[in-house]
Amino acid sequence: EGGGSGSRGFTRPWAIPLITFGGALVSAFIVAKLAPEAQGHGTDAAIEAVHSDPRSIRARAVAVKMVSSAITIGSGGSGGREGPTAQISAGFGSLLTRRFGLSDADGRIAVSLGIGSGIGAIFGAPLGGAVLAASIVYREDFDYKALIPGLFTSATGYAIYGSILGFEPMFGFVAPDYRFDPRQLIWFLVIGLVSAAVGYLYARTFYGTVALTRRLPGGIVVKPAVGGLLVGLLALLIPQVLSSGYGWVQLATTRESLLTIPLWIVLVLPVAKILATSLSIGTGGSGGIFGPGIVIGAFVGAAIWRLADLAGAPAVPGGPAVFVIAGMMACFGSVAHAPLAVMIMVAEMTGSFSVIPGAMIAVGIAYLIVSRTPVSIYRAQRLNRETAAAERVSHPVPEV
């Protein structure tokens, strides 16, 4: 069902900041003592391993990442589960590279496949995961050598995951009967423009927090704990920022449920979720940033629909589902520089492939805008295969 929607109010509000603080403190302590490289969102570490040394991901870091992320997210920290999953599955690819003595080229593909298949499985999006494996490591390129094996690994991962937890789309079948209406093109244009701005804000705020955290006094245990405390205080005002937020996305897809959420919360939630994720993960906490990006994009679409519906604007769908789906695709697809992969993944997560024709407008516009800036939510990405190869020549991996 996409996760719980959380609470609309608290019986003991004073406990929320204490829980988020305590969870962040314990998580950061585990990371600091056992595997300092496990802090942060994890996907960048996996991407960096692809480009620098596909044998470099330690098994200990993978185990620590799994435990610390579960504590962070479970205690209310704003993060997603894809970052830990990416590092865990990429770590398995790194392990295979070491154990079987794979070449550097094959090792890079193995780690890329781990990233894509892990994320594809956890979101129930095997096709999107395969495309992600081929595109996530570059800003402006596509590694076609990873695509075909990515289809096999993503399908296998999804088959195993689905046999245990089921094969229903993550958010259910949100808009399976949608029919494209050319009159709505202007709305997809608006969604694309706003999504580009919010996605840009997401990346700049997140890495601005990372940079600020490095300059502030305090150790790698204290800073995430303070971030967790601030998230808990923010949640007293906007409880929707807690944890993954996937349940709130599911509520936002139906008219009846979305209208029960106060308008001001719908409007400020994208920015509030950006702030909460930056405080939870940008300060050194453990968790993913893909999932929050999906939530942020969903409420960009929900906010546009609420305002358009309130104003009685023409060609507005009767429900918010289409706008929510397009927002998810455009907002994160653009800032991750993986528009095709994210678009396919969201379509699989919502069982709504019929939305793609219109959403392509939103995704394309958002990506064109963001791609003209130096911003990416994944800083370990290289520009293309040529620049990555040149970097490996100038900075070869030492022989072990």
Image (spheres, grey):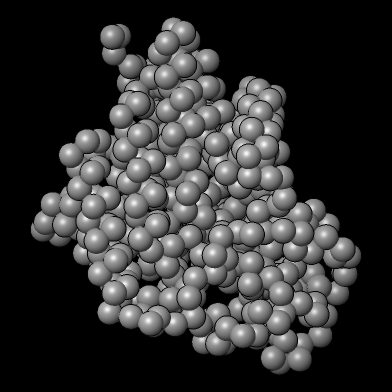
Residue 99 coordinates in the image, percent (x, y): 42, 10
Please report the residue visible at 70 percent of the width from the left and 38 percent of the height from the top: 127
Of residues 115 and 389, the one nearer the viewer is 115
Q: Is residue 102 above or below residue 55?
A: above
Of residues 33 and 270, the one nearer the viewer is 33
Q: Is residue 331 shown left or right of residue 169? A: left
Point out the image quarter for the N terminus. Answer: bottom right
Q: Is residue 49 shown left or right of residue 23? A: right
Q: Quadrant of residue 181?
A: bottom right
Residue 344 visible in the snapshot: no
Residue 354 coordinates in the image, percent (x, y): 83, 57
Q: Quadrant of residue 98?
A: top left
Q: Residue furthest left?
A: 217
Please report the residue visible at 63 percent of the width from the left and 39 percent of the height from the top: 164
The number of numbered discs placed on residues in the rendered structure image is 0
Please report the residue visible at 72 percent of the width from the left and 86 percent of the height from the top: 309
Q: Quadrant of residue 51?
A: top left
Q: Is residue 13 above or below residue 331?
A: below
Q: Residue furthest bottom?
A: 311
Q: Is residue 355 above or below residue 89?
A: below
Residue 133 visible in the snapshot: yes
Residue 53 coordinates in the image, percent (x, y): 38, 22
Please report the residue visible at 34 percent of the width from the left and 76 percent of the height from the top: 234
Residue 162 coordinates in the image, percent (x, y): 67, 40
Q: Is residue 251 shown left or right of residue 198? A: right
Q: Is residue 311 above or below residue 293?
A: below
Of residues 271 and 152, the one nearer the viewer is 152
Point out the image quarter for the C terminus. Answer: top left
